[in-house]
Structures are given as structure tokens and as C-alpha cells.
Image: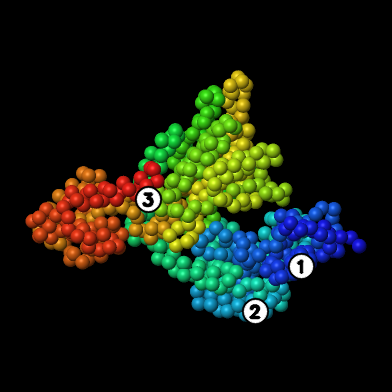
């Protein structure tokens, strides 16, 4: 009898072949099998009912459980399929689009795009959810079937699913997998894996309904997108829903309008941000503080165009690996140009403009560079996902012996920046290439191994705990992703530090070493905010629009009780402006209660209420937005108070 050599944790044994993945787990841990949703077999995620056949290699089995990132993704993707099954049952004739899990979106956990026989409404969501719960209780099996392309097309043609047929035609070469939910009308073309049966889906909620276009193309079919989320346990879902309720109060789109910070206008284009004066003040403070620290760390400031010849993007590899996210070429005098999706090739051009010696390195270039990405309309979301944005971009050109030090300095820089903005929970992920099944990566295995080792070493030297993420590297090199946790516990992807051995090779970058020979520099891509727009959106929600004094667009508002105090109010405001503070005076003829309410709505840190007594004594009555009245003081005392508060906020981390 043939046998399978199975490794489970530190244990290894042989079991009869063929056997399913579930059989292999059960041979080691019968109780553990109850917790498993699927498993990784030599790194590949497989359903529990997948059959394993005899092979010479040892098969490493790693169960995927609910309390893991991979497990949560399985739950959410399987729940998206359950959603589609419920819709097909309730609304026969519905055409299906796609239904992915969403792991980086703090708002939702999955969605499914559909074209139903009638327009669905918000009132339909509880009905669909009830049907999903009924199906979940029936323990309906997720069944996988490998089918050749012609047969798959026949199946979906018979079901009158033109969008699925289009996907199959585009993506399938010879064969692919179908997934069924038994005793339901659902069939989907999908890679899998999924949970074993619907009974594993115990905590889910439908959240919203919106419009979407097929493949994000406004010229294509208009669909309806149903959003939901799912968790392993009901208490996790309940906690998330409570957090979501708080998040809705902090929604940066609502607060952006209320506080007059920014706008998005369809007349100018979706995903394109118009920064208003008050938003511009905050952006200027963000950039000013960052630039001061960049100067201290030896960076040079550069500026580059927004467009370049198409050939440049071919040479850089973006044309071949990133073209779906680039705007279409435009022709100028028989030459094709494209808007830049990234700044790196331009910084390479600056490096190449002069011969470089080993004494010249490192070269550290920094640019607040605006880039453009052709994001699908369905993915756009306020400041968080846009089509035009500015990156606090830096590229470092270094000798091999400088990589460790420069990456470590970038890590220190990132921690300092995020602490300054009040983010004390920072998470680091080392994204690496992954196994041979990962496609599209450039460079040799030796280069990748060395690059990954350099980044890991810098993290470990700083005693930084990190998670190694397989298969999430950029196509040109491994990277460190930096995530922060905001005031209500949501995690946001922001900064990145990427080691690139590929672009220096493609562009034939050189420096002359101390041996008088030509050598290839390493290149480090580094962004801390990620993008100004996204970081600004995160800040709005983190602070709920109540920015700290040093960052607030209006730091003080002067509120005269009556019109006869207006001259004194303007004098106080002018004195504060001369001292370097951002001040408004509200001299509109209105009741003081209304003026205070307006200042509270605008989340201004300090209000100075001025009446006859303050005019007579040359004082100010001070209100703080959270504490309310904090007393009467002289203007000099107030200036000293807020000067200390302002400087303490940005100096506590050494800025």
C-alpha cells in the first residue's frame, strides 16, 4: 500500500494514501480537526476534503483555524458565497459578478456584485441575511469540482451568467475549479479554498448596498454591490459593530465637509481631492514638520514631472507589472507619454545625472511627489482611496554595507513620526516573495534571499516584533509595511520601507568603489505617511476632527459678547496672530451661546469669551473645547499657556 509522509508541527509519520487533508490532520490531532477550516499543505491553501496522493516528498500540514488572518479570510470569502446563494434563492434569475473577502478595508469584510431581477433596496438586506442564517444552520457543504474550460463555459451559459462566462474566457486556460453549496442554487467559478460547510459561518452581518459597474467601467453593466462582514465569533462581530458605530461618527468624509477641510466634485473627477484652506493648513503643518526632520537626517529635496515617456515605464517594469493601475498613454508629437504612478524612475534619473563615487553614498532624495493611479470607481473612498495623491516619497541609493544602517534609520524615523501624531501602537510586517507559486516577481533567488535577510536583520536589531507575510512583497523586492492602530482600535496600512535590487539593475546604476571598480548600488523606497491624503483621512478619524492644538487649522477663536467689544476682540486676535497662532474672531451679531456652539461644532481648541469686564480689565475668559470654562487670565498668561502646550506636543518625541 502506498503511503503519505506527513509532517505536522514537529511530528512526522506515514499514513495510507490516498487520504484527504482532513484525514492527515486527524492522524495527528483528532480534536484539532474540529477547529480547522482548511489547511496549508506545503504552503498551498487547500480545502479539508482535497485528496492527497502518494509522493516522494514530505507533506507539511498546517491547519488554518478561525482565530487567524487566513482563517478570517476563509470565513469572509465563504460568507460572500453564502450571500450569493441566498440572493439566488430569493431572487431567481440574478446574475452574479464577483464576491471577494476584504481584509484591509476597516469598513467591510466582503461584498458580492449582482444584477437582480429588480433593484434591491436597504429593506431587502434583513430578508437576505435571515435567509443566509437559515442556510448556515443547515450545514450545507461547500463542494469543489475541477472542470475543463469548455465544460465550465457550458455550465454558465446554461445558467445564463454572461459575466461569469466573460471571466472564464479571460482567466481560464485549460481547466478551473467550480464551487457548489449543496442543496442551493449556487455555483461559482473560484480558486478556493472554503470552509467545509455553512455551519462554520456563525457571525455575519449585511451592512450596505451601493452601485457598482462591472470591472469598474462606467460603460459596462451597472450592478448592485452588497457589503457585509463576518467574524469567527459573535462577540467579535458585536465588538466590531460597536466600533463601526463610533467610526460612523468619525467618518472623515462627513467631518471633512463639516469642518471645511476638503471636497470631491464629480465635475472635476472621482477620486481627485480639492484641498480647502483649512485642510491646507493641516497639510502644510504635516509637510513642514516632516521636512524639518528630513533635513536633520540628511535628505535632499527634489522635484520631478508628473508625466514621462512610455518607454521609461517599460524600462522600469511598471508597464508590464502595473499597467492596469496606470492611466492610458497620451500621444505628443508621435511619442507616447503616461502619467506617473510612482516617483522612483525620476529619482533614478537624478542619481544617473552625474558619476557617483562610494564617497557620495548614501544619496537620500525626498519628494512630496504627486502620482496618479487608475483606480476602479467601486474602490474609491474619500481620502482613503483616490486617483491622484501625494506621496512623502524618498529613495535612498546606498552601498551594500550601508543597507542595514539606512533601513534601521528609516524604522526609527517611522516610529518617531507616528508617536508624534499620537499613534503608540505600531505594527510591522515583513512582506516577502513567498513560494514558487507566486508569479510576477523580478530578480534572482539569491538577490531575494539577501534582501529579505537585510530587512529582517534591521527589525530584529531594534527588537521590533514583526509578522512575516508570504507572497505580499512588491514585484521588485521585499518590504516592511508599517501599520498603526487608531483611537478606536482600527488598524491602518500607512508607511512602507522597500528594498529594491531590481531597478538599479534595470537602469544600470553604478558607483565607483574604493577599488576603482564599478559597483551596483542598492535602492531603498521609503514612505512614512504612505500618502498625504490617506494619512490625513486617518488623522481626521483618529482625532474625530478635534485636532490637537499644534495641528488645528484654527487654534483660537475670539468671541465678543456684544458688538461694542468687537474692537477689543480684533485687538486680541491680532496680538495672538503676531505671536504665531492661528486665530479667528467671530464678530457677527449673534448670541454668545450660538457663537460657542458654532466653535464647538468646528472643534476649535480654545475660545476666548470677551465681555465688558474683560475689556475693562484687559483679560480673556478662556473656554477649552472639552473642559469648558477654565478661568479668566491675562492675554500674556494665555499665550504662554498655549505656547507651552503647542511646543510640548511636537517635542516629546524629539522633533
Looking at the rendering, in which quadrant would you find the N terminus? bottom right
Percent of width and height locating residue 408 = 52, 40
Asked whether the beta carbons under mark 2 and mark 1 sit within 8 Å of each other, the answer is no
Asked where in the image residue 14 lies, by quadrant, the reply is bottom right
**The residue tagged with tag 2: helix, strand or loop?**
helix
Badge 1: how crowded within 10 Å, few (<14), some, or many (20+)? some
**Residue 626, numbered circle:** none
Percent of width and height locating residue 231 = 58, 68
Real-space Cα separation, disc 3 to disc 2, in angstroms = 50 Å
Q: Is residue 478 visible?
A: yes
**Residue 26, numbered circle:** 1
Q: Which residue is mark 2?
A: 137
Real-space Cα separation, disc 1 to disc 3, in angstroms = 59 Å
Q: Nearer the viewer, residue 649 or 93?
A: 649
Q: Which residue is mark 3?
A: 275
Percent of width and height locating residue 147 = 78, 63
Asked whether the beta carbons under mark 1 and mark 3 sit within 8 Å of each other, the answer is no
Looking at the rendering, in which quadrant would you find the C terminus? top left
Give me the residue at 58% from left, 34% from top: 522
Q: Nearer the viewer, residue 264 or 461?
A: 461
Q: Is residue 264 visible?
A: no
Give me the residue at 27% from left, 53% from top: 555
Badge 3: how crowded within 10 Å, few (<14), some, or many (20+)? some
Percent of width and height locating residue 29 = 74, 66
Q: Nearer the viewer, mark 2 or mark 1?
A: 1
Give me the residue at 50% from left, 63% from top: 107
In the rendered image, the residue lying farthest to the right is 1
Whichever of callouts 1 and 3 sits on the residue coming sooner in the sequence is 1
Amino acid at each position: 500500500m502506498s503511503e503519505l509522509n506527513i509532517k505536522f508541527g514537529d511530528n512526522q509519520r506515514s499514513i495510507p494514501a490516498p487520504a484527504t487533508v482532513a484525514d492527515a490532520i486527524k492522524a495527528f490531532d483528532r480534536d484539532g480537526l474540529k477547529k480547522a477550516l482548511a489547511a496549508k499543505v506545503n504552503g498551498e491553501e487547500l480545502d479539508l476534503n482535497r485528496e492527497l496522493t502518494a509522493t516522494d516528498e514530505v507533506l507539511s500540514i498546517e491547519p488554518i483555524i478561525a482565530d487567524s488572518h487566513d482563517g478570517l479570510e476563509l470565513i469572509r470569502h465563504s460568507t460572500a458565497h453564502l450571500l450569493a446563494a441566498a440572493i439566488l434563492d430569493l431572487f431567481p434569475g440574478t446574475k452574479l459578478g464577483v464576491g471577494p473577502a476584504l481584509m484591509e478595508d476597516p469598513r467591510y469584510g466582503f461584498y458580492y456584485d449582482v444584477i437582480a431581477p429588480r433593484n434591491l433596496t436597504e429593506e431587502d438586506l434583513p430578508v437576505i441575511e435571515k435567509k443566509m442564517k437559515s442556510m448556515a444552520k443547515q450545514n450545507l457543504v461547500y463542494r469543489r469540482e475541477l472542470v475543463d474550460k469548455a465544460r465550465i463555459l457550458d455550465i454558465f451559459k446554461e445558467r445564463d451568467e454572461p459575466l461569469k462566462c466573460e471571466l472564464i474566457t479571460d482567466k481560464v486556460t485549460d481547466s478551473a475549479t467550480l464551487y457548489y453549496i449543496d442543496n442551493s442554487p449556487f455555483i461559482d467559478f473560484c480558486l478556493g479554498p472554503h470552509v467545509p460547510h455553512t455551519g462554520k459561518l456563525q457571525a455575519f452581518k449585511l451592512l450596505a448596498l451601493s452601485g457598482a459597474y462591472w470591472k469598474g467601467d462606467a460603460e459596462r453593466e451597472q450592478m448592485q454591490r452588497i457589503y457585509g462582514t463576518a467574524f469567527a465569533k459573535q462577540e467579535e462581530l458585536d465588538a466590531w459593530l460597536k466600533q463601526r458605530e463610533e467610526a460612523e461618527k468619525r467618518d472623515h468624509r462627513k467631518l471633512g465637509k463639516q469642518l471645511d477641510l476638503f471636497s470631491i466634485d464629480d465635475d472635476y473627477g472621482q477620486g481627485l481631492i480639492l484641498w480647502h484652506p483649512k485642510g491646507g493648513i493641516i497639510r502644510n503643518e504635516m509637510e513642514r514638520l516632516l521636512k524639518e526632520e528630513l533635513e536633520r537626517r540628511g535628505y535632499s529635496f527634489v522635484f520631478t514631472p508628473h508625466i514621462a515617456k512610455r518607454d521609461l515605464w517599460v524600462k522600469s517594469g511598471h508597464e508590464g507589472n502595473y499597467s492596469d493601475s496606470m492611466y492610458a498613454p497620451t500621444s505628443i508629437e508621435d511619442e507616447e507619454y503616461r502619467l506617473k504612478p510612482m516617483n522612483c524612475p525620476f529619482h533614478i534619473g537624478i542619481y544617473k545625472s552625474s558619476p557617483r563615487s562610494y564617497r557620495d553614498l548614501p544619496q537620500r532624495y525626498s519628494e512630496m511627489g504627486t502620482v496618479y493611479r487608475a483606480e476602479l470607481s467601486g474602490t474609491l473612498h474619500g481620502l482613503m482611496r483616490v486617483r491622484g495623491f501625494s506621496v512623502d516619497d524618498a529613495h535612498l541609493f546606498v552601498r551594500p554595507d550601508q543597507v542595514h544602517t539606512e533601513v534601521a534609520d528609516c524604522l526609527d524615523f517611522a516610529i518617531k513620526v507616528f508617536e508624534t501624531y499620537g499613534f503608540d501602537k505600531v505594527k510591522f510586517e515583513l512582506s516577502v516573495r513567498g513560494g514558487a507559486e507566486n508569479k510576477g516577481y523580478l530578480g534572482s533567488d539569491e538577490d531575494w534571499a539577501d534582501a529579505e535577510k537585510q530587512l529582517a536583520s534591521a527589525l530584529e536589531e531594534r527588537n521590533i516584533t514583526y509578522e512575516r507575510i508570504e507572497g505580499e512583497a512588491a514585484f521588485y523586492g521585499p518590504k516592511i509595511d508599517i501599520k498603526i492602530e487608531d483611537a478606536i482600535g482600527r488598524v491602518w496600512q500607512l508607511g512602507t520601507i522597500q528594498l529594491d535590487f531590481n531597478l538599479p539593475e534595470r537602469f544600470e546604476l553604478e558607483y565607483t568603489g574604493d577599488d576603482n571598480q564599478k559597483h551596483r548600488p542598492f535602492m531603498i523606497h521609503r514612505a512614512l505617511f504612505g500618502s498625504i491624503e490617506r494619512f490625513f483621512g486617518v488623522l481626521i478619524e483618529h482625532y474625530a476632527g478635534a485636532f490637537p492644538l499644534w495641528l488645528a487649522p484654527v487654534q483660537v477663536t475670539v468671541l465678543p459678547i456684544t458688538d461694542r467689544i468687537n474692537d477689543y476682540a480684533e485687538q486680541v486676535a491680532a496680538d495672538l496672530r503676531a505671536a504665531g497662532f492661528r486665530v479667528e474672531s467671530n464678530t457677527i451679531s449673534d448670541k454668545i451661546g450660538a457663537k460657542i456652539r458654532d466653535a464647538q461644532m468646528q472643534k476649535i481648541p480654545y475660545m476666548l469669551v470677551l465681555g465688558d469686564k474683560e475689556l475693562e480689565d484687559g483679560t480673556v475668559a478662556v473656554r477649552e473645547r472639552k473642559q469648558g470654562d477654565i478661568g479668566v487670565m491675562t492675554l500674556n498668561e494665555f499665550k504662554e499657556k498655549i505656547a507651552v502646550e503647542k511646543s510640548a506636543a511636537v517635542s516629546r518625541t524629539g522633533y
